[in-house]
Amino acid sequence: MAAHTLGCGADGGAPAAPAALSDEQRAAALLDPGALLPPRAETVALADAVAIASSRAEAGAPAAALAELAADLRVRLFRLDQAATDAREAMELYSAAATAFRASADPAHLERACQAERRRALLAGELARDAAVSYRELYLVSRRYAALSPPASGGAPPAPSPCLGAIAVALAQAAAYRPSGDALRALEQEGHRVEGVALALALAPGAAPSASAASAAPVQTTADASGDLVVAPPASAAPAGPVKVTSIERHGSDKGARVVIELSAPTTFNVGTLPADETAGKDARIFVDIARATSRGVAREIEVGGVLRRVRVGVQPKGTRVVLDLAANLYRRIFYLPEPFRIVVDVSTRPPVRDDEGKPGGAREVRRVVIDPGHGGNDTGAVGPTGLKEKDVTLDVAHRVAPLLARELKIETLLTRDSDVYVPLELRTARANAFHADLFVSIHCNASDNGRARGVQTFSLAAPHDAESTSAALAARENAARAARGGQGADPGDPEARREVAAILSNLNVGDMAARSRHFAELLQRSSLASLSPRYPDTKDQGVKGAGFFVLAGADMPAALFETSFISNPDDEARLATADFRQKMADAIVNAIRAYREGK
C-alpha cells in the first residue's frame, strides 16, 4: 500500500508543489551568468531583502556571507544598467561583509574579508572609470591585510594569501597609475594609518600577537579608505537583557554635527551608511543598529539643521535603529564612551586627516581656536582648602584669553561656556568640531589626594602606559563628573575601566593628530613655565603626559588639556585666587598658540 501511494498527495492526485525558494536562494541563483534577471525593481528589492537579512543574522560569518551575496547581486545589476547607485550600494555591502568576516573567530574568514575588500576596491575604480583610484584602493587593502595576516608558527613560513597575491598582481598591472611625489607620500602615510588601525584590531593592550587576538580586544576598530572610523565594543559585550535609549543629544552646524545616544547600560551596535539617492529623493544616511535597545519615550524624529537634517528613531526586531539624515556625504566617525554608556556619531565637512600641518616658512594656519573652561554649573570641579572652586578659576582664565587672541593674533575664538552653566564633556568637543577650530584648549585645575602636589601640567589625548598611573587617575576623576550624572555606578578607580577608556580614545587619534596634539601640549607647558617663572620661581614643572580625557575625545584638531596648578595645595590655591596669576596663565595660553601658528 505504501508503495502504491509513494510520490502522491493525500488524495492520490498530483505531486505536492515544491517549497518556495528563500530570498538567499533566489539571489544566489541570479548570480549565474546565464540566469535572466527579473525587472530592475524586483532585483533591487531582492538585494535589499538579503542585505536586511544580513543585518539581522548572527554576527560574524553568517551576516558577512549575506552581505557579500547582496553585494554580488548589486554588482550584476551595475554591469547591466551602469547605475552608479548599484555600485555604491555594493561597495557599502562589501565593506560590511569584510567587517563581519573580520569579527569572526575563524582565521580562515580573514581571507574572505580580504577578498570582499579587494572586490570593493576594484569596483571603486570601475565606478570612477579611473585606474588610479583602483591602485589607491587596492594598495590600502593590501596594507590592512598584510598587517592582519597571522604570523608564521613553528618555524614554518606563513601560508600565502590568495587575496594578497591577487592584489599584488593587480598593483603590478596598474603600476603606470601609481602616484608619485607628494601624492605618493600622502598615500604611504595613509597606508601607515590604515595599518595602525588594523594592528589595533589584532592586539589587546599588553597581549601577545595571535590570530584570534581581535576577538579578545577591549574594542573593535574599523576604518576605511575614505577616512571613516568606527570604534565599537566587542561582540562579547552584548547585553544579557534589554537596554533603553535614555536620551539623544545633538549639536549641528553648517560645518559638522555630533549626535550622542545615551543608553541605560552597555550594549553592542553596528553602523552602516547609505549614499544620497537623488532619483528616490533620499538623503545620505548613517544608521546605528543598537542591540536589544528599546526607545520608548524618545522622539521618533528630531529636526537638527545644518549638515545634519534630522535624527530618526525606529524599532527593529532585535533592537533600535537610529538614522541620521545628512545634507551631503560627510566624513564620519562613530565611537562609544562608557559610564554612562554613550554612542557618539561625528560628521564633518572636514577630513580627519588633512595636509595642513605647515606652510612655506614653517607657519601653520590657525584662524579659529576653541577655549574650554572646565566644569561649570552644578559641576564645581575640584575645591581648594579655603573653598575656591575650579569652575570659577577656569572661566575667569578663559575670559582673559579670548580678547587677547582677538586683539593680538586676530584669531576668532569660541568659548564652550561663557557663564556658570553645565556643559556635557562630549558637547564641548562637538562645538569645537562644528566651529572647524584649528586648536582646542581645555582649562582645568589639578588636585591631589594629599594636598602636597604643586605645579603646572599639560595633557594630550593618549593611552597612559599604566592604567593605575597618576595620569590615568586624574583623567578618571575628570571623566567621573559625567558618569555621576549618568547614574550607572561608575568607579573611576577601576583599572579595567581605565584600560577600556584608553583603548577607545587612543584609536580616535588618526593620522598624525596625536603627534600634533602632543607638540602643542609641549608648547603650552613651556609657555606656562616661561610666564610664571620670573614672578613665581618655585613653580614645579609636572611635565606633559598622555591620558584618556573624555573632553578631548573625537576632537578633529590638535587638542590639549591644561592643568593650571593644584587647587588642592594651599599655596597654589592662594595663587590661583589672584588676578595676577590668572593673567599669567592666560598669557601662557596665548603665547603657546602664537608659537604653534609660527611653526615653532
Image: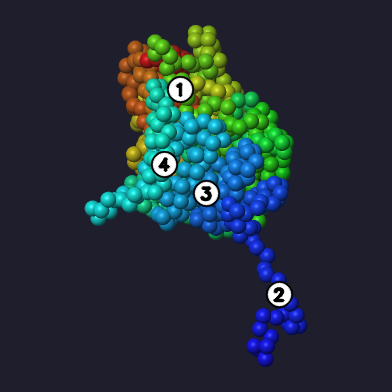
The amino acid on which the numbered mark 1 sits, given as a three-letter code, is Asp
Check disc 4: other Cα within 10 Å, few if <14, some if 14-19, many if 20+: many
Residue density around tag 1, few if under 14, some if 14–19, many if 20 or more, within 10 Å: few
Residue 518: numbered disc? none
Inter-mark Cα distance, 2 to 4: 50 Å
Look at the numbered disc 1 and give the secondary structure of its residue.
Answer: loop
Looking at the image, which residue sits at the far bottom?
A: 1
**Residue 276 visible in the current orientation:** yes
Q: Which residue is mark 3?
A: 97
Q: Position of residue 474 (x, y in %)?
A: 42, 36
The circle drawn on residue 167 is 4
Would you identify the image quadrant in which residue 325 lies? Answer: top right
Q: Mark 4, mark 1: which one is toward the viewer?
A: 4
Q: Nearer the viewer, residue 62 or 578?
A: 62
Q: Distance from label 4 to label 1 (Cα)?
A: 28 Å
The residue sitting at the front extreme is: 34
According to the picture, the residue beneath numbered tag 1 turns out to be 355
Q: Residue at x 58, y 54 (%)?
A: 32
Q: Does the residue at mark 1 contact the one at mark 2 (Cβ under 8 Å)?
A: no
Mark 1 vs mark 2, CA separation in Å? 67 Å
Q: Secondary structure at mark 3?
A: helix
Rendering coords of residue 295 (x, y %): 67, 49
Q: Nearer the viewer, mark 3 or mark 2?
A: 2
Q: Which residue is mark 2?
A: 16
Q: Is residue 152 left or right of residue 86?
A: left
Q: Quadrant of residue 452?
A: top left
Sequence-earlier tag: 3 or 1: 3
> On the rendered image, what quadrant is the C terminus found in?
top left
Question: Image height check: is 58 above or below 228?
Answer: below
